[in-house]
Image (cartoon, rainbow, N blue to C red):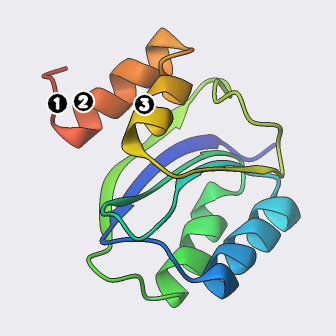
Amino acid sequence: MPPIHRILIKTHHMTSRKKILNLTRAASNLQCSVLLKTGAHPPGMMFAEGGGTEDWMKVVKKLRYKDFRLMGKDEVNERRLDVEAGKVVELTSMKEFAAFLERDPVIYEWWRVRMGYTEG
């Protein structure tokens, strides 16, 4: 069984439906759980968790998002993101994104540290 990774990517924004469809297909094929913050208002956020996240991130890089920044990448013991493996949840505001992550204190704290909102 491949190791489970948790990845956080920040971009300028995510508006291209074609790119988002590519990310969704890759998540399905690689059985990654993915949370996206999309829309014209910066930033664009991608949070992925699972065994295929390294390959999923290669797909992201090929899409050449503006201001791509890998904010965090860690190997973890278990999946905690409340998204079914192979599925993508798309949200349109940072407030919604944070509220979704806040459901799990471990995930929420990991995200806050990687974003620089708090020290960890």
Across and down, in percent, residue 71 comes to 30, 52
From this view, report whether residue 116 is shown above or below residue 30.
above
- Which mark is drawn over residue 93? none
Q: At x 38% / y 42%, what residue is drawn?
A: 94
Amino acid at the residue labelled 2 = Val
Q: Are marks 3 and 2 in contact (CB under 8 Å)?
A: no
What element does badge 3 sit on? helix
Residue mark closest to the camera, 1 vs 2: 1
Q: Is residue 72 left or right of residue 35?
A: left
- Which mark is drawn over residue 113? 2
Quadrant occupied by the C terminus: top left
Residue marked by disc 3: 98
Amino acid at the residue labelled 1 = Tyr
Q: Quadrant of residue 1?
A: top right
In three-dimensional space, the C-alpha distance between marks 3 and 2, rounded to whole angstroms, equals 13 Å
Across and down, in percent, residue 58 comes to 56, 77
- As rendered, which of 48 and 117 lies closer to the eye? 117
Residue marked by disc 1: 117
In three-dimensional space, the C-alpha distance between marks 1 and 2, rounded to whole angstroms, equals 6 Å
